[in-house]
Amino acid sequence: MKRIMRRWDDVENYISEDYVIAFQEVLKTALKEKAMSHSDLAELLRVSRSRVSQLFMEGTNPSIRYVGLVLFRLGYTMEFKKEENGSGDK
């Protein structure tokens, strides 16, 4: 079965990139709070340091599963909630 995915419009791209940037900011904060380096995080996640560095690159697109794992290992959680203004409704 072939999946066809439409191109995202500018607003969708902006929103998705905004979430990745928010994740990166949480990562930076967590590492600073815990006085951890990228190497320390790599060891905690059992991945290479380059894999951790990829999380901080512009244009990165980590899966929701991987984001959840990283946050869990750092003692953070993720929360989903409906926007009050309903802007996501169509």
Image: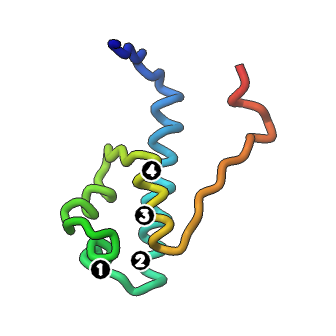
Of marks 4 and 1, the one in the foreground: 4
- Asked if disc 2 and disc 1 are in contact, CB closer than 8 Å, the reply is yes
User: Which mark is first along the chain, 2 or 4?
Assistant: 2
The earlier-in-sequence mark between 2 and 1 is 2
Residue 67's disc number: none
**First in residue order: circle 4 vs circle 1:** 1
What's the residue type where badge 2 is placed?
Answer: Leu
Mark 4 or 2, closer to the camera: 4
Q: Quadrant of residue 90?
A: top right
For marks 3 and 1, the one nearer the N-term is: 1
The amino acid at mark 3 is: Val
Q: Amino acid at mark 1?
A: Asp
Residue 31 — which label?
2
Viewed as shown, does residue 79 lie left or right of 36?
A: right
Q: Secondary structure at mark 3?
A: helix
Position of 22 with respect to 46 (left or right) is right
Q: Report the residue marked by disc 1.
A: 40
Residue wearing tag 3: 70
Give the residue type at disc 4.
Arg
In the rendered image, which quarter is residue 63 located in? top left
Task: Please report contact status of discs 3 and 1: CB closer than 8 Å, yes or no.
Answer: no
Q: Residue at 48%, 65% (x, y): give it.
A: 71
Find the residue positioned furthest to the right. 84
Q: Which mark is residue 65?
A: 4
In terms of image quadrants, where is residue 37?
A: bottom left
For marks 4 and 2, give the CA distance.
20 Å
